[in-house]
Image (tube, rainbow, N blue to C red):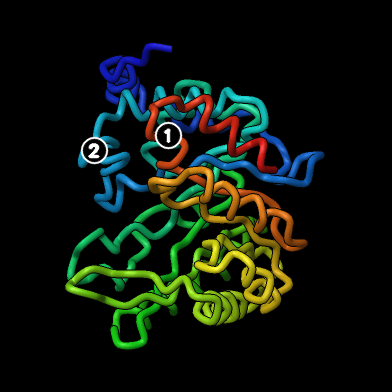
Amino acid sequence: MTLSIPDLTAVRARRPEAVAEAAARRVRRPLLGDRGRLMIVAADHPARGALGAGGRELAMANRAELLERLCLALSRPGVDGVLATADILEDLLLLGALENKVAIGSMNRGGLAGAAFELDDRFTGHRAADLARLRFDAGKLLLRLDYTDPGSLATLEAAARAVNDMAAHRLPVFVEPFLSHRRHGRVHHDLSAPAVTRAIAIASGLGGTSAYTWLKLPVTDDPDAMAQALAASTLPAVLLGGEVGDDPDATFDKWRKALRLPTVHGLIAGRALLYPPDDDVAAAVDTAVALL
């Protein structure tokens, strides 16, 4: 599929109502299909200024190329949907790529990558009301907590409000929690089993109800300790794919082990699938689907 940015821009400029019209007629599906598993492709990185992938500093900055890769990923068997910010989801709506797919809106993108205020992660993306109005299927929020950074408290409070708002609209919300710290000015996540366990416990208790809360979790440094971490909550979970690194087979093996755990219902992965080392998006997506 060859996508034209000018064509999309022309529709946006002349008929902005086309977005709402496409959302209104989109064919929806249940969050969990008959398999009871979820395979979601993530593309919410650009709105945080995180444009690098696969060794290319501005890989995700080319919107036409990103949309082509997303449409290819969404066309592969076993892919259930996409997680993205409003601009990308609306591009995909206009392209007709979200039919019978799960559309998850990214909610807090204010913690820009590398910024001094990165951990004061304001809700600058989708609100619960937006997701309901556009008939999207769920939302996702990032919860990075640094016990030494006062900005984390603002994020924690805002996240609790978002959980309440999503529950009021009966919309699932995927909470992605980390215990984080700064090292040499950069934010790093603690993926030890105790830290992931503590993050799960904190995220599970957000808001006045957890009825619509899901967890989006990294695999611990020690994959065998993942079961111990997941024992901290009864909430359904999906795995965060993250970077594959230099040893894809080892990464996929970690994912495969964690996907066997009883509360894990699927995988959400982004750059690892959209910008794989060999640039074969279809093969990377098919490998991830096979893990389920």
Determine whether, in the image, residue 24 is placed left or right of residue 122.
right
Quadrant containing the N terminus in the rendered view: top left
State the residue at coordinates (57%, 23%): 75
Q: Is any part of residue 22 visible from this angle?
A: no
Q: Nearer the viewer, residue 98 or 284?
A: 284
Q: Is any part of residue 232 visible from this angle?
A: yes
State the residue at coordinates (26%, 76%): 182
The amino acid sitting under disc 2 is Arg
Q: Position of residue 286 (x, y in %)?
A: 59, 30
Name the secondary structure under disc 1: helix
State the residue at coordinates (46%, 56%): 127
Q: What numbered label is drawn on residue 56?
A: 2
Q: Position of residue 228 (x, y in %)?
A: 67, 76
The amino acid sitting under disc 1 is Leu
State the residue at coordinates (26%, 16%): 6
Quadrant containing the C terminus in the rendered view: top right
Name the secondary structure under disc 2: loop
- Relative to 74, say whether 218 is above or below: below
- Relative to 8, say whether 78 is above or below: below
Alpha carbon of mark 1 to alpha carbon of mark 2: how far?
13 Å
Q: Position of residue 30 (x, y in %)?
A: 73, 42
Q: What numbered label is drawn on residue 100?
A: none
Q: Which residue is mark 1?
A: 274
- Relative to 29, say whether 6 is above or below: above
Q: Within 10 Å of the Cα at label 1, are there few (<14), some (14-19), or many (20+) other Cα atoms?
A: many
Closer to the chain start, of discs 1 and 2, is 2
